[in-house]
Image (cartoon, rainbow, N blue to C red):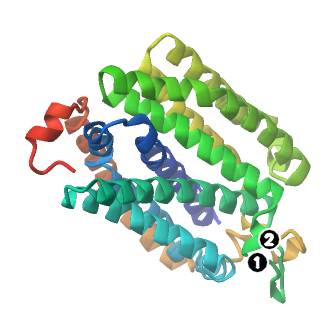
Amino acid sequence: MELQVTWFVLWGVLWTVYFMLDGFVLGAGMLHKFVGRTDGERRVIINTVGPVWDGNEVWLITAGGATFAAFPTTYALMFSYLYTALLLLLFSLIVRGVSFEFRGKLESERWKGAWDTAILVSSFLPALLFGVAFGNIFKGLPMDRAGYHGSLLSLLNPFGLLTGLLFVLLFLVHGALYLSAKTEGDLSSRAKAVADRVWPALLLAAAVFLAAVYLSTSLYDNFFRAPLLFAVPFLAVAALLATRMFSAKRRILRAFAASCATIVLVVSTGVIGLFPNLIPSSLDPASSLTIFNSSSSRYTLKIMTAVALVFVPIVIAYKIWVYRVFRGKVTEEDVLEDPQAY
């Protein structure tokens, strides 16, 4: 039982770190065509995320791998039940990576414009789809012992779409603050202005989401059983307010750090509310997939724990090193002078 709980915590941490890191890349991708007014500015935006975006995907792959190895039944049924949505998500992530690489291969406005649109769409769709997927997991999927009774359209219910909207707005603010911190001059100012304009909509969406969680899900049950856990969503709200406060004072790095904290705490709220479920059933609670009825053997979990203790710190150390090396601002001069720039 202890190992199953350990891997549930690690599973939650992997998703949390992924959303915190890839969130600003998705946000930058959604904004780059609008915040960047010239080809040079758009290249600057792409190069702010160029050294890190593919490394951020490691956390997504690891989260999927951890689900497969630690909770194989959940992995199998999730990819069966949500096959179309997950396929759209996969294609979007593939197109985004290809777009970064192919955009600068030809000096053609039409060519670059097409890939700019591809970057926009392939950044928006994952943000929305991740939110819709987790919203439906929080709400519970229509499944029982006979199988899954939903479809792609049934995932687009009000709560799922609300969660998708929340993710999109979170990542827009997150990405705008990242761009403001990583660029200079008018480009940095425009990115900050976008963050300030989107923030009120994010605050409203967050307030509606917290109310909808109470009305549409059972996520708060764990919080009512252990009221001290309410500190997590309260801190999430505090971090969201701090994001706007620091931005207003032009302390962009602190605003970005507060945005990171907001995403971590929002996702943590959902993970805490799910425990011990991985995919709750909205039809029959006995058919819910939990960490106990869908886990691997104790021996497998022991091996995985030993592997994680060795390699997760290495990955963390590598990511810290990468962000330290590329911590400086990106300018048009840097992009023009570097033949390896996007």
Total marks placed: 2
> As drawn, is 299 to the left or to the right of 335?
right
Q: Do we see residue 148 in this rendering?
A: yes
Above or below — where is 202 with respect to 76?
above
Is residue 312 visible in the rendered structure shown here? Answer: no
Determine whether 147 is above or below 299 in the image: below
Q: Amino acid at mark 2?
A: Ser
Residue 299: x %, y % from top left: 50, 78
Name which residue lies at 44% across and 70% down: 304
Question: In this orientation, which residue lies closer to the viewer: 313 or 90?
Answer: 90
Residue 306 place in picture, x, y as percent: 39, 65
Q: The N terminus appears in which quarter of the rendering?
A: bottom right
User: What residue lies at 70% left-to-right and 71% top-to-bottom?
Assistant: 292
At numbered mark 1, what does the secondary structure look like: helix, strand or loop? loop
Which residue occupies the foreground of this view, 115 or 90? 115
The reply to whether dot 1 and dot 2 touch (C-beta < 8 Å) is yes
Residue nearer the viewer, 268 or 143 = 143
Name the residue: 66% across, 76% down.
82
* Residue under the image location 20 percent in, 38 percent down: 325
Point out residue 247 in the picture as x, y percentages from the top left corner: 51, 18
What residue is pinned by disc 2? Answer: 154
User: Could you tell me how far apart the alpha carbons at marks 1 and 2 are, in whole angstroms?
Assistant: 5 Å
Q: Which mark is residue 151?
A: 1
- Front residue (pair 48, 77): 48
Q: Is residue 202 left or right of residue 282?
A: left
